[in-house]
Image: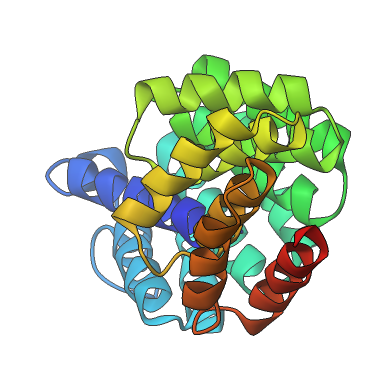
Amino acid sequence: MTTRTAQILLWMLVASVGAGAGSGAAQEPATGSPWTGPAPALDQLKAGYAAMEEGSFEAALAHYRRALESAGTAELRFQSQIGVGAATAALGRADEARAAYAEALRIKPGNPEALLALGQVAKVQGLLDEAAARFAEAAVAAPDPVQALTELGVVYELQGRHEEAAEVCGRAVSRAPDDLDALLCAGVAVYHLGRYAEAAPLFAAVVERDPASARGRYGLGLAKLYLGDLDGAAGEEKALRELDSALAGDLGERIAAER
């Protein structure tokens, strides 16, 4: 799972805890759980979130499982399953993460966050057709579809579907012109289509916003190279040496071959 997706899922948990804090006792009556006070699931969700923020994924998983044990509403069960999925995904336990996210989606069919998370797990497992289907569903369901569109574009790139990747990543950029992942996705897609004049400004936008982006500089260097700007490409290769020696070496070899 990407850091960005984990942050979104953590935000979901915080939002749920905040929304339920005032009414949790009414929605979730005390059950005599030994874990904590009158709203044990909410308390465990809070503790799980804090553990995720600290990178203590095993501890977070224990809290989310305790939350699930005491969850008295569908919403709390949903958030607990999302938490279990996030923690097991962070631990590299993809099958467990898939099962948790699938259960969350069963509780809330069509939920865009659960769809996005399932797509991420499928991508990690190399199930690209499934990942594409999940991301496409999430892009339709989400109020803000930028991440789902970008993830869909990345999967299309992995499948060699460059035209489709360019289309969906272009849609993501049109919605969020400053989104680095969307810009990179669009740049890679049009680069693979041989549209170097379109790729160069997309990569340049990434580098402008994040000068330490190795992928952005590498893409910009390649685009400049194949537009005939060897000096510009060499400048990107020089900057890239301090960021990613492997990418710098590859770009340097390509420049040498064109001289």
Q: Nearer the viewer, residue 49 or 180?
A: 180
Residue 200 x/y as whole percent: 52, 40
Name the quadrant containing residue 88: bottom right
Residue 59 x/y as whole percent: 49, 82
Visible residue check, residue 169: yes
246 shown above or below 33: below
Residue 191 x/y as whole percent: 68, 37
225 shown above or below 148: below
Q: How is the image coloured?
A: rainbow
Farthest residue to the left: give it: 22
Residue 232 x/y as whole percent: 50, 57
Count all numbered tags in the image, as a single digit.
0
Farthest residue to the front: give it: 259
Q: Nearer the viewer, residue 170 or 135?
A: 170
Q: Residue at x 77, y 56 (%)?
A: 124
Q: Residue at x 24, y 68 (%)?
A: 37
Q: Is residue 189 left or right of residue 112?
A: right
Q: Residue at x 54, y 51 (%)?
A: 220
Farthest residue to the top: give it: 140
Q: Nearer the viewer, residue 247 or 43?
A: 247
Q: Is residue 182 left or right of residue 31?
A: right
Instruction: Work out which quarter of the rendered image holds the C terminus and state it.
Output: bottom right
Instruction: Work out which quarter of the rendered image holds the N terminus and state it.
Output: bottom right
Visible residue check, residue 71: no
